[in-house]
């Protein structure tokens, strides 16, 4: 199979039929063998009914419906797990991603050897203050921390080699950082392509300030994991040892001063150095233990929150 097109969605019943016809025209005009995976992330409208209707007409349409809303990362994770195509395309269901971009994205992966191509919506039709400016700030921070020179990390339109989607673990809200996850997994041929951005035709955006804040918190998480995720003791153990050593030096100095240099002076507990020493050694010990526990946890299987699929269509 040439292509797997993964479309996570939440309450997008108005746009699904139009999006399907648009994708089907592109597939037929290019002669691709394909599957369209609609991942319904707990929609409360008629999205699942529309997917059933499309699947009845087109056997290449497959669907998976979550029992409740788990989030875009879990939807993409499931789609990656089920994808069979040599090239995997992800796109949003709101018609803001243009299916006409698919052939060029496919060629970049299938014929030019890239592992991942991320879309770059250079010209956007979103609100400047609600989404454009926060997105620019977010992407600037992501470039600085990850080392990837991408302009739009969170663009829904991306193309992947099948091997990539089978080797990245998308959980929590890490869908924003799939290029970073791919880089950390060892895939090096990652680039971007300017893609057309469409104005939203139906419904309303799911973007809010909470998602913007969560994005930066996730950026800190993935920055930490990329450097110390496999060896947390290297960070916590080093900091803990340093703080404990500082506290020990203060304690040693106080002991020498009280016993030898100034035995008739103030009590050790009346001196501020004592509390610096005590706090440093306690915090140092706690950090060291945190690193040790992190190493123990790392040796067990990760138990991320699992989703529960309510219904499936055409999934083998």
Image (tube, rainbow, N blue to C red):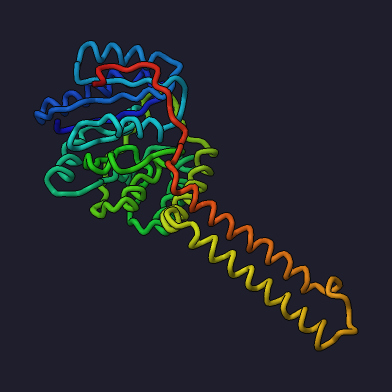
* Between 184 and 143, the one nearer to me in the picture: 184
At horizontal 35% and vertical 12% (from top left) the residue drawn is 49
Please tell me how many numbered marks the rendered image carries: 0
Quadrant position of residue 17: top left
Whether residue 114 is situated above or below residue 309 in the rendered picture: below
State which quarter of the image contains the C terminus: top left
* Between 302 and 99, the one nearer to me in the picture: 302
Whether residue 29 is situated above or below residue 214 in the rendered picture: above
Q: Is residue 257 left or right of residue 70?
A: right
Residue 170 spot, x, y in % from top left: 38, 39
Quadrant position of residue 158: top left
At horizontal 45% and vertical 37% (from top left) the residue drawn is 303
Please identify the residue farthest to the bottom as the structure is shown: 261
Whether residue 183 is situated above or below residue 97 in the rendered picture: below
* Between 265 and 226, the one nearer to me in the picture: 265
Quadrant position of residue 31: top left
Residue 79 spot, x, y in % from top left: 31, 30
Q: Is residue 154 left or right of residue 286?
A: left
At horizontal 48% and vertical 44% (from top left) the residue drawn is 215
* Between 268 and 201, the one nearer to me in the picture: 268
Residue 151 spot, x, y in % from top left: 35, 51
State which quarter of the image contains the N terminus: top left
Residue 263 spot, x, y in % from top left: 86, 84
At horizontal 32% and vertical 50% (from top left) the residue drawn is 185
């Amino acid at each position: 199979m040439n292509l797997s097109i993964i479309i996570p969605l939440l309450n997008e019943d108005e746009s699904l039929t139009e999006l399907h016809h648009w994708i089907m025209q592109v597939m037929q005009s290019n002669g691709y063998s394909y599957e369209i995976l609609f991942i319904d992330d707990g929609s409360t409208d008629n999205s699942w009914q529309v997917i059933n209707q499309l699947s009845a007409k087109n056997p290449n349409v497959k669907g998976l419906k979550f029992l409740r809303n788990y989030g875009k990362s879990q939807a993409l994770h499931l789609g990656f797990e089920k994808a069979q195509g040599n090239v995997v395309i992800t796109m949003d269901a709101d018609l803001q991603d243009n299916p006409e971009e698919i052939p060029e994205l496919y060629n970049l992966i299938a014929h030019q050897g890239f592992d991942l191509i991320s879309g770059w919506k250079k010209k956007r039709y979103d609100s400047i203050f609600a989404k454009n400016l926060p997105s620019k700030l977010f992407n600037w921070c992501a470039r600085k921390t990850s080392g990837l020179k991408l302009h739009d990390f969170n663009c829904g339109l991306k193309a992947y080699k099948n091997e990539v989607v089978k080797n990245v673990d998308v959980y929590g809200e890490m869908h924003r950082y799939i290029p970073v996850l791919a880089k950390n997994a060892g895939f090096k041929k990652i680039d971007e392509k300017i893609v057309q951005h469409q104005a939203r035709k139906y419904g309303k955006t799911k973007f809010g300030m909470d998602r913007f804040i969560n994005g930066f918190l996730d950026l800190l998480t993935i920055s930490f994991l990329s450097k110390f995720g496999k060896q947390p003791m290297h960070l916590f153990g080093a900091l803990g040892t340093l703080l404990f050593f500082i506290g020990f030096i203060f304690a040693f100095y106080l002991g020498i001063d009280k016993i030898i240099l100034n035995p008739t002076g103030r009590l050790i507990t009346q001196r501020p150095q004592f509390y610096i020493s005590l706090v440093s050694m306690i915090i140092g010990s706690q950090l060291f233990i945190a690193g040790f526990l992190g190493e123990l946890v790392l040796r067990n299987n990760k138990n991320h929150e699992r989703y529960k699929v309510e219904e499936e269509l055409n999934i083998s």
